[in-house]
Amino acid sequence: MVDAMLGSLVRKLRAFGFDTLYYKEGDDEGIIRAARSTGRILVTADRRLAAASEKSRVTVLLVSGATDSKRIRSMIAGAEAKGLSLEPGESLCSLCNGPLVQVRRENVASKLPRLVAARHRRFLECTECHKLYWRGSHWKKLRRLRRYFVAQPVGEG
């Protein structure tokens, strides 16, 4: 469960395969209740919300940093300090958190920009909102961020 301050991080976490709910509207008590009732870890950059969450016995990861890279590293460090393991999975829809399935280019070509359909071979579609994905220019940026989730051997890092 990620608070409204971290929308960009939500999209990245979903792309990395973390089932992530985005709490865009509501007060601190509401997000704490939602995290507790769904059994989710709360991710926030808000110190007061983090303190209130801990008092309410909700696991919280307080992130810091102005970039997604710094936020991810601080989130991983916080998880390690609490003995939590953050393992990325299969990518989810960055828009709605739905599962993605591979689709044939010829089945979706009419929904794609002409150059994208001509240039790319592999496409994924969200089973919920039907957003289409392909390995465009953003892919390299995501791969650089995803490396932070790969466990380092003891003694390295």
Image (spheres, rainbow, N blue to C red):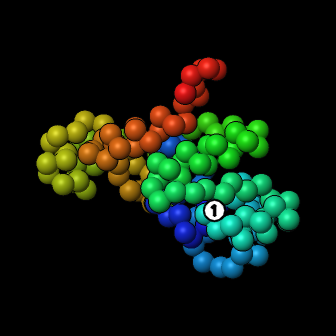
Quickly name the residue at label 1: 44
7 vs 80, left or right, is left
Q: Can you see residue 51?
A: yes
What quarter of the picture does the N terminus occupy? bottom right
In which quadrant of the rendered view does residue 59 lie?
A: bottom right
Kind of residue sitting beneath label 1: Thr
Q: Residue at x 40, y 38 (%)?
A: 144
What quarter of the picture does the C terminus occupy? top right
Q: Residue at x 85, y 65 (%)?
A: 56
Q: Position of residue 121 (x, y in %)?
A: 25, 36
- Callout 1: few (<14), some (14-19), or many (20+) C-alpha neighbours within 10 Å? many
133 vs 74, left or right, is left
Q: Position of residue 107 (x, y in %)?
A: 28, 45
Q: Can you see residue 127?
A: no
Q: Position of residue 39 (x, y in %)?
A: 77, 55
Q: Up-down: is 95 above or below 90?
A: below
Q: Position of residue 80 (x, y in %)?
A: 70, 39
Q: Nearer the viewer, residue 101 or 7?
A: 7
Label 1 sits on a secondary structure element that is strand
Q: Residue at x 55, y 69 (%)?
A: 5
Q: Nearer the viewer, residue 71 or 8?
A: 71
